[in-house]
Amino acid sequence: MLEASDITVRYGPRVILDGVDFSARAGAVTAIVGPNGSGKTTLMRALTGEAAYHGRITLEGQDIAGAKVWDLAALRGVLPQATPLAFPFTVLEVVRIGLSRGVAAGQDGLIRQALARVGLSGFEGRYYQELSGGEQQRVQLARVLAQVWEPVEGGVPRWLFLDEPVSALDIGHQLQVMQIARDYADAGGGVVAVMHDLNLTAMFADQVALIGEGRILAQDVPGAVLRDDLLSRAYRCDVRVNRAPVDGTFILPHAAGMAAE
Amino acid sequence: MAPDIAQAPMLGDRSARAQTLSLVLILLLGAAIVLSLAVGASGTSLWQAVLGLFTGEEVGVRERIILMDIRLPRTVMGVLVGAALAVSGAVMQGLFRNPLADPGLVGVSAGAGFGAIVAIVLGGMLPAGIAAMFGSSLVPVAAFVGAWASMLLLYRVSTRRGRTSVATMLLAGIALAALMGAVQGVLIYMADDAQLRTLTFWGMGSIAGATWGKLLVATPLILLALAGAPFLARGLNALALGEAAAAHVGIPVQRLKNAAILMVALAVGSSVAVSGGIGFVGIVVPHLLRLLVGPDHRYLLLNSALLGAALLLCADVISRVIVAPAELPIGIVTATLGGPFFLWILLRQRGVLEM
Ligand SMILES: Nc1ncnc2c1ncn2[C@@H]1O[C@H](COP(=O)(O)OP(=O)(O)O)[C@@H](O)[C@H]1O
Ligand SMILES: [Mg+2]
């Protein structure tokens, strides 16, 4: 269980998140959606202890404010929106950095499994800096997966925090990566993902938190959050939610008539 | 039968190569040590005497004195200073996440030299009691404090939210060196003749003045810094992903940074205290090693120590023979070799510099 209550984050005098409550349970994929600059990444950075916040955040009963970094590393992996690298490491060496500390420390055998999982078998010897943005993002995902490989360890769920894990990817790899998140949750782990694509969110999430101007506008099952009125208000444009031929939902912005304020 | 791939090194894993390189570098260092003991400008070739060290054969009194009281301390100092400078360079580059960071280039050596000069000039004005309390450790301690202060200042100025601006880092180094230079000018003006002679030696960098006495203070400090370096390796690897990502994989980033800054200050401070400013070792050695076996700090730091030591000994041997019977200061040799190499790195790194 991840519980965040009354979270406020300021950058200088600017209030980015204003008393936000957010929770996620293990065994589910929880998506955070909202327009650019609404504070999705900021919420993610607070939840992972990266940004200074007021309020209280607990992960599996541990207050993350007082936790040791290596205890947190054993409990959860974090995929940032983009990760530049300072030196010419190979793909294998980058993934190995995920095994620095925590319970998976030193288990080099996981490297190949993790790379295979993100569809990068055979990339071990390539230089990270020479890969495309999408490939780099998948290498980083492999690093994060290797760090918390088992979704449940000693009865305690592990967690993946993913900030826009698929934004740089083509549709095939988008599905592949979302499926990894789905499988991780189905195996008992927790997944919190900032999502840009509402259709993928509708397809893969169990819970959706819609964020706008530093507040959570709604957090519920996808059907209750991905609604014309809520989305139109949050994204400030006319949005229609439609039914896909089979069983799914798809969401289209409508150019005609911007939503009236 | 399929080949046993479990035994083969994994694709993209340069650990085995890095370990093999360590063995090669150990041999290279051994050869450099023998060379440094045997070759000299004193007109005495000591091959026979060096051989005697190993075989236990009788060695003449004169040879023994040159070997034990001049060549040996000089060689030990070369090994220590070379290792200290190269490892400091590698650690700084990891800390600043930038291959151009070097104690000489960004003003840390200048800070150490400044501390040492203050100690030399003003130390003479201290009450005898206090001066005696510090004894010969006054200069190294002052150099350490100078190096530490400049590391802290440099890091504060050039790094924001875990990102280092290359331009700011280099410019801050220039500003730091200029400031130190100005204050040094005043101190040199105040210095007496004996102090002046000591000071001139800082400008050039040399290990020719090595004595067991100087080594007595510097050796434990450098060894302490070198012994601490391996504990930084995993953290520096993770830091290459940025501070936030390093924390997320379980590295206590603030502690790592403090330790790295302390380690560099200790190594550079004590090196500069005994040998003045010897440039380029800290940038050339790690760069070459990254080209050969990659940036993994678990191997980079050890290999830097070995190659740095070997390279400095070779430079010192060159400085002894190239204008024999006179000697060049070693700083001139490393600058002559390192300068063009540095330009070559700049050409390769142009993309990075345009940031
Ligand atoms: N380090 C920072 N300093 C100041 N403002 C920031 C910083 N990071 C983000 N912001 C601001 O906070 C707001 C929310 O940003 P962010 O959480 O990154 O949005 P997004 O929902 O697109 O991920 C934006 O207006 C952004 O400009
Ligand atoms: Mg974002």
Image (cartoon, coloured by chain):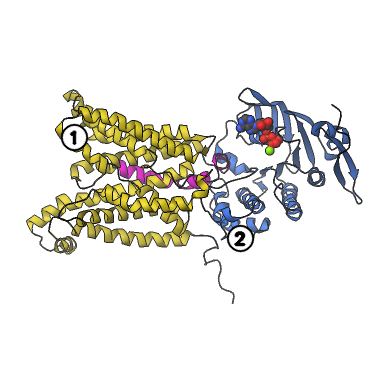
Chain colours: A blue, B yellow
The residue lying toward the viewer, choosing from A251 and A70, is A251
Q: Which residue is mark 2?
A: A123
- The mark lying in front, picked from 1 and 2, is 1
> Measured from the top left, where is residue B172 in percent x and y?
42, 35
Find residue B207 and name its label. Answer: none
In the image, is A17 to the left or to the right of B184? right
Q: Which residue is mark 1?
A: B196
> Measured from the top left, where is residue B169 in percent x and y?
45, 38
Mark 1 sits near ligand 1, with its Cβ under 8 Å away: no
Let me know if residue A157 appears in the view. no
The residue lying toward the viewer, choosing from A130 and B343, is B343
Question: For numbered disc 1, what is the local secondary structure?
Answer: helix
Vertical position of residue A237 compared to residue A91: above or below = above
Vertical position of residue B139 compared to residue B304: above or below = above
Please state the extent of the stretch shown in magenta in the rendering. B221-249
> Measured from the top left, where is residue A63 in percent x and y?
62, 31
The quadrant of the rendering that contains the N terminus of chain B is bottom right
State how far apart marks 1 and 2 are (Cα). 60 Å
The quadrant of the rendering that contains the C terminus of chain B is top right
Q: How many marks?
A: 2
